[in-house]
Image (cartoon, helix red, strand yellow):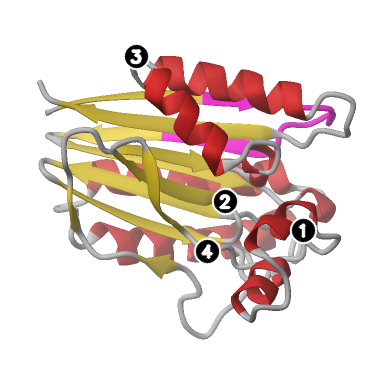
Amino acid sequence: MKITHSLYTDVGSREVNEDCISYAGRGGAECFVLCDGLGGHGKGELASQFVAGSLCESFKSAPDSDSFFETALTAAQEGLIAEQKRIGAVFEMKTTAVVLVIEGSRWRWAFIGDSRLYHFRKCKPVFRTLDHSVPQMLALAGDIKEKQIRCHPDRNRLLRVMGVEWDSPRYECGSWQELREGDAFLLCSDGFWEPITEKEMSRLLKKASGAEDWLAVMSETVKSNGAGTDMDNNSAIAVVCKGG
């Protein structure tokens, strides 16, 4: 199976891009990472760069992909807490994270915060991670509709992030799943998924020749839909699997 990927990031209307996207390969395995630093805390770009770099370095040195997730995420969290103390930025360096690993004919994800992973099969969305945010909890409780998350006034209130002390892991990990021909994945920050609907993602995937083409037309849609607004940093990683 041939796997193609494409990475994209844009500062939007902000002065600093606090998103960070990264990729690492090891043998026949690939790791994709996207982090979105919390701008309201002042050093979001440092947090996202630190965690993305830590996860990719851990992946490259990991003995196997099975043990990577828990070990790497814990190391990134502990390292970020230590870095906060080292530079005197306790309570300031925080970030979301979403990770996808593809190895042979299987794939697995992990995330924390509101950066998302979408899984498409036959150009239809079949799964997405559920945000660790106030609006997501309201949607799960039936108090608002899922589509209202995008414009909810509390959409930036996150319940879980990296860079906050925890007694037990706060991230979520999926189990290994079978990779099939035609599968596609999208890792994206909230600045990317808010201006574009899942229906638009699917429609553009159907027309795309591969990961690069799909991400290019999606990013243009994000910019078009967000025109005239105070656009957040918007970043994404597209991965498309085709028969080789």
Identify the mark nearer the N-term, 4 or 2: 2
Q: Pointer 4: what residue?
A: 130
Residue 9 on the magenta segment? yes
What amino acid is at disc 3?
Answer: Ser
**The magenta stretch spans which residues?**
8-22
Give the alpha-carbon distance from disc 1 to disc 3, as whole Å: 34 Å
Give the alpha-carbon distance from disc 2 to disc 1, as whole Å: 11 Å
218 or 109: nearer the eye?
218
Mark 3 residue crowding within 10 angstroms, few (<14) / some (14–19) / many (20+): few
Task: Name the disc covering residue 209, or none.
Answer: 3
| Label 4 secondary element | loop
The quadrant of the image that shows the C terminus is: top left
Mark 2 residue crowding within 10 angstroms, few (<14) / some (14–19) / many (20+): many
Q: Pointer 2: what residue?
A: 115
Mark 1 residue crowding within 10 angstroms, few (<14) / some (14–19) / many (20+): some
Left or right of 204? Residue 208 is: left
| Label 2 secondary element | loop
